[in-house]
Amino acid sequence: MSRRFAGIDIGSRTIELVVVDEAGEIVESVQADTGFDPMTEAKQLIDGRNFDHIMATGYGRNLFEISFDASTVTEIKAHARGARTLFPDIQTVIDIGGQDSKAIALFDNGRVKKFEMNDRCAAGTGKFLEIMAKTLGFTIDDFGHEALSADSELNISSMCTVFAESEVTSLIAKGENRQQIARGLHASVIRRIAGMVNRVSSDGDIAFTGGVAKNPCMHKLLEEKLGRTIRLPDDPQRMGALGAALLAAESGSA
C-alpha cells in the first residue's frame, strides 16, 4: 500500500485537510468551519483518515503542532507550493485569507524569492470585506457579484475598518447606491493589494489563492489594476493544505 501524506490549513474561518499519495495526487479533501475550538474541529477532520505524516499551516499551525506533535510550514511556503503545482509557470502568488493578505514572488524552481504581508490590520483582508458586506446588507457570497453590477464606484477614503464602516454607514444614510459603495470598497482593497504585488513582482501571470479568490469582483479588478492575468484554482481555499501535504510528502520521503 502506497504511503499517504496530509496537509492541514487552520485558518481564521475554515480548516482544510488534503491527503495526497506518493505521486502527489489528491486522494481526499475536506473542509470544516474553524469555529470557537479549532483543535477540536481539526481532530474531527483527521480522525479515521489514514496518512503517514501530516504537516500544518495557517494561523493555528503552532497550536496544532503542540496538540498533535506535527510538523509545520508557513502559509507563504504552503500556498506557494500548492499554487506552483497547479500552475507550473507562475512566479507570483496572491493569497488573501480572513486575517491577512500576501504577495509572494517565486524563483524559477518554485522557492519563495520575496514576499510582502499585511497582517497588522484588517484592511485588505477577507475580514474587512466580510464586515463591509454586512454593513451594506449583503452576504459575503453575494458581495462581489453586487459590486460587479455597479456601473461606477464611490470613492472610499478610509482603509481602517472602523472608519470605513462609519463612512459606509454615512453614505447609506445619504441614499447612495449600495452596489456603487460595494464597488468602491473593492477598489480600495485592490489598491492596497496591487501595491504589495508591484513591490515583489512586475510581470507574468499570477495565481490567486485563499478564500477571497472566490470573489469575482476582486478577480476582475485585480486583472484590470495590474494588467496581468490572474489564474484561479478550482478550489483556492485548499491551496495551503495542498502545499502542506506536498511538502509533508517531500520531507517524509527524504
Image: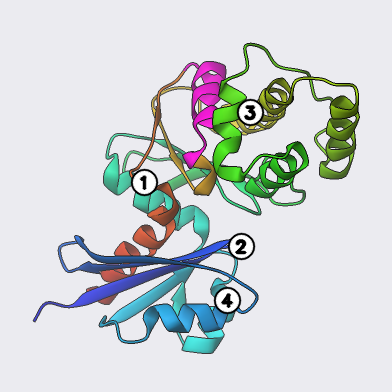
What secondary structure is found at the residue carrying circle 3? helix
Identify the mark nearer the N-term, 2 or 4. Answer: 2
Q: Is mark 1 on a helix, strand or loop?
A: helix
What amino acid is labelled 3 in the image? Ile
Q: Residue shown at 51%/48% (left/top)?
A: 211
Amino acid under disc 4: Pro
Q: From the viewer's perspective, is 227 left or right of 151?
A: left
Task: Give the residue at mark 3.
Answer: 190
Look at mark 4 in the image and give the residue it sits on. 38
Q: Can you say whether 236 is above or below 242 in the image?
A: above
Asked which quadrant contains residue 49, the reply is bottom left
Image quarter of residue 132: top right
Q: Which residue is found at the position 47% from the left and 88% from the top?
A: 69
How many angstroms separate mark 3 from mark 1 (CA)?
A: 21 Å
Q: Do the residues labelled 4 and 1 touch (CB within 8 Å)?
A: no
Return the x and y of residue 218 as percentages of the image width and height: 55, 31
Q: What residue type is labelled 2?
A: Ser
What separation in Å lies between label 2 and label 3 (alpha carbons)?
21 Å
Q: Mark 2, mark 1: which one is toward the viewer?
A: 2
Residue 224's spot in the image, x, y percent? Answer: 52, 16
Label 4 element class: helix
